[in-house]
Each structure stands twice: as structure tokens, then as C-alpha cells.
Amino acid sequence: MNFPQSSNRHISAKGRTTLVSALLVGVLVVFTITLHLGQQQDSVFLNDNNLFQTALSVQTQDPTQAEPLLRQLLVTHTDSYLLLWDLADVLAAEHKYAEAAQYYTLARHARPILVSDQQYLLSYATTLFNLGELKLAQQYLSHAGPNVFSSNDNPQLTQQVNTLQLQIDKTLASSIGGAKR
């Protein structure tokens, strides 16, 4: 078997040195750029994390301070169900129920599994109750009851679910009773 003879293409020592040097410079440039971009990303992450932690810490004390922080974070993290949910909670605490309901819905669309979270269901149902959407609130509460979550039940949340359910039942009964008179 005869293999074709290759032409005499040998790289000289100087050529090899130049090639290796160029490759090393290229690797160093890529490494430096990657390092710089990584540091920028870390900086953005740390800033966003600090902003989020600040929003969480003021959320319960003064929702009006948390709202602009959460909105600012949502500009760059539009699909974060946690930010959407937290903003909905803040808006509900500020009695902005219609807008809160919109953000609860957006959170659920971003993370459909929220329909199995007792806290989410209670918060959303409470907002719907405050909007006068009693049947819809009742529907969400039916998914937040004690038999739905079995061992994952939070007794305090279950009590709040039961209390809200009683309020809805009384309101519905009074509106039906008032309509019969």
C-alpha cells in the first residue's frame, strides 16, 4: 500500500513558536474577557440580591417602601414568580386589590405549581374576597383546605383558610338572604 507523499510542509521552529505564542495570547485574551464579564455579572447579581433583601426586610413594616424596590427588580427579572408574588402581597397590604390580583395571576402563570401552595391560595383568595369575587375566592380556598395538603398543612394557614371561608359563607348568605326579602 502506497500512501501519497505529502509535500514538504514543515513548520519551522520560529513558525511554531509564533503559532504557540499567538494561541497563548488568544487564550489569555479570552480568559481576561470572560473574567471581566463574570465579575460584571456577579456585581449585577449582588446588587439585585441586596435590593431584594432590602425589599423583603421592609415588606412587612412598610409595604410602600417595598413596592418600588420590587418593581425595579421586575424590570430585569420579569418572569420571577417570587418577585411577582411578593409584589402582589405588597399591593394587597396597600389595599390595591385589583392590581394585586393581576400580579398573583402573573406569578401563577410564571410558576403553575403555585396552585398547590397553601399560602399562595390563601393570599390570592383573600384578595379576591376583598374585590368582591366571592365565588372565585371560594374556589381557590377549596384547594387550600386541610384535606388537600395532608401532611404539608400549616395549622395557622388552615385556620386562616377556615376563617376566610366562614366570612365568604356569611357574605354569600347575607347577599342571598337580602335578595329574598
Image (spheres, helix red, strand yellow):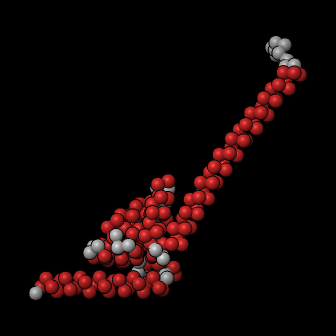
Q: Quadrant of residue 46?
A: bottom right
Q: Is residue 180 above or below residue 87?
A: below
Coordinates of residue 151 in the picture (x, y in percent): 52, 81
Residue 62 showing in the rendered view: yes
From the viewer's side, name the closer residue of 67 and 35: 67
Residue placed most toward the observer, 60 or 85: 60
The quarter of the displayed image where residue 105 is located: bottom left
Count of picture labels: 0
Q: In which quarter of the image is the C terminus?
A: bottom left
**Image position of 31 with respect to 121: above or below:** above
Say whether residue 139 is visible: no
Residue drawn where x is 82% and y is 12% of the image: 7
Residue 10: horizontal and vertical position, in percent?
85, 17
User: Closer to the camera, 20 or 176?
Assistant: 20
Q: Where is residue 84 in the image (x, y as percent from the top left)?
A: 44, 63
Q: In this view, does 134 lie to the left or right of 24?
A: left
Q: Which residue is drawn at 37% across and 67% down?
A: 100
Q: In this view, does 7 lie to the left or right of 147?
A: right
Tell me the quarter of the image containing the N terminus. top right
Q: Is residue 47 above or below residue 159?
A: above
Residue extending farthest left: 181
For this rendering, which residue is in front, 76 or 65? 65
> In the rendered image of this protein, does residue 108 appear above or below residue 18?
below
Q: Where is residue 143 in the image (x, y as percent from the top left)?
A: 39, 75
Q: Residue at x 32, y 67 (%)?
A: 98
